[in-house]
């Protein structure tokens, strides 16, 4: 781990930026030159592990400085001069007009637990509250949330979205054109994602915790209520009784593709222990489905769409492993969690801090200076 930490600190020092008074870390100085919302939440958690409390706070403050008047937190803030990935969103702002999985309250909870700094929570709470309210009105039918674009999922090319495009296994080129069509409004996209809603549920608990921490007991109670109702709807709507797993919903139908997202409800701690154990025995530890040499592939091996090398289509991502690891720990399934941690460490020791990895042979994919792969330091 010492060697990995040294390498990781070198990456950080190249990826840290200070632009117009904002300090943040780009996901990769090679290909992602701006600030991304959920990346920065992960970065904040990683900084806490390294004892860099100030940097952890800066990541949060810089994200919040891009919040819109209506409460939305955009998935990208274009700071700096690079042209790469820069799209004209037609908003007149230097941000995108969509969001990403709402990880920010959880990151702030972690800061508070580590630094015991109430002032920081007081400083950011209103903005967080405004964001989670915005989610409920702008992305909620009832309590569960939907996403309006594949990029809001944080898992851009997951084959689950193919279903919306009406096409099995589109090529890279067609995927790109679908995403542009959705942005232009000529293709309709409205999906209740398991990952997005699991992250949301866990973060509602963080909001309740943070409200209590600063003495807002009515707010805390309100968040508890929303949590309860959202959890009920999650179960009612996303659970497939035939298989016992949770699937994304599109036009009131499950999209029955097994992805690593089936394990995300572990992170929310909403499963009964028997359900958690069954999920793990039957799916996670099954070598024909998810337990590859370098798990956890984003898509199950037995799916038509499984491609171990491809972006979100069967490759392994460290943030997904981190969610599953934290979920396993919630259920005190420590041996399996440790095995997943060891395999994730061996992946990074072999290939470095890549964006993602081939889930069969462990080869690094995407840039090799990718910051959220440092979540390995928070798997403990
Ligand atoms: C890709 C990922 C997304 C991430 C971004 C920056 O678009 O799919 O989740 O936030 O890269 O790392």
Image (spheres, helix red, strand yellow):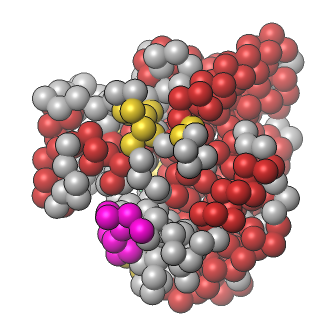
Q: Is residue 311 visible?
A: no
Residue 44, percent from left and from top: 63, 51
Residue 284, percent from left and from top: 62, 65
Residue occupying the point 23% across, 47% down: 86
Residue occupying the point 78% across, 43% down: 272
The correct choice, above or below, for 47 with respect to 225 in the image is below
Residue 301 image-quadrant placement: bottom left
Q: Give the range drawn in magenta.
A: 302-311
Q: In this view, does 171 lie to the left or right of 354?
A: left
The correct choice, above or below, for 136 with respect to 84 in the image is above
Q: Is residue 224 left or right of residue 39?
A: right
Is 9 one of the magenta-colored residues?
no
In front: 236, or 363?
236
Residue extending farthest to the top is 218
Residue 36, percent from left and from top: 43, 47
Residue extending farthest to the front is 242
Residue 215 image-quadrant placement: top right
Q: Main secondary structure of the magenta part?
A: loop
């Amino acid at each position: 781990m010492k060697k990995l930490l040294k390498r990781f600190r070198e990456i950080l020092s190249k990826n840290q930026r200070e632009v117009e008074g904002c300090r943040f870390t780009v996901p990769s100085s090679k290909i992602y030159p701006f600030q991304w919302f959920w990346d920065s939440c992960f970065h904040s958690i990683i900084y806490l592990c390294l004892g860099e409390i100030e940097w952890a706070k800066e990541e949060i403050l810089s994200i919040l400085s891009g919040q819109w008047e209506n409460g939305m937190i955009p998935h990208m803030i274009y700071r700096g001069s690079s042209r790469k990935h820069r799209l004209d969103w037609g908003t007149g702002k230097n941000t995108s007009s969509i969001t990403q999985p709402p990880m920010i309250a959880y990151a702030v909870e972690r800061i508070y637990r580590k630094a015991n700094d109430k002032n920081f929570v007081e400083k950011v709470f209103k903005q967080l509250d405004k964001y989670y309210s915005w989610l409920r009105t702008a992305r909620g039918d009832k309590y569960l949330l939907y996403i309006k674009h594949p990029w809001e999922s944080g898992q851009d090319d997951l084959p689950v979205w193919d279903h919306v495009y009406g096409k099995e296994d589109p090529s890279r080129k067609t995927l790109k054109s679908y995403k542009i069509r959705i942005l232009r409004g000529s293709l309709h996209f409205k999906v209740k994602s398991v990952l997005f809603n699991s992250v949301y549920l866990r973060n509602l608990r963080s909001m309740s915790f943070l409200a209590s921490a600063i003495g807002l007991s009515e707010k805390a109670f309100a968040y508890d209520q929303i949590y309860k109702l959202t959890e009920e709807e999650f179960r009612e709507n996303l659970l497939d009784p035939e298989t016992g797993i949770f699937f994304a919903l599109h036009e009131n139908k499950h999209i029955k593709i097994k992805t690593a997202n089936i394990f995300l409800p572990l992170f929310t701690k909403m499963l009964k222990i028997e359900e958690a154990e069954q999920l793990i025995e039957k799916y996670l530890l099954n070598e024909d489905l998810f337990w590859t040499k370098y798990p956890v592939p984003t898509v199950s091996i037995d799916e038509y769409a499984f491609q171990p090398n491809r972006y979100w289509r069967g490759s392994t991502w460290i943030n997904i492993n981190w969610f599953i690891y934290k979920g396993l720990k919630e259920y005190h399934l420590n041996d399996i969690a440790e095995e997943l941690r060891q395999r994730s460490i061996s992946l990074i020791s072999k290939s470095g801090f890549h964006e993602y990895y081939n889930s069969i042979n462990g080869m690094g994919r995407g840039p090799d200076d990718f910051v959220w792969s440092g979540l390995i330091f928070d798997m403990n």
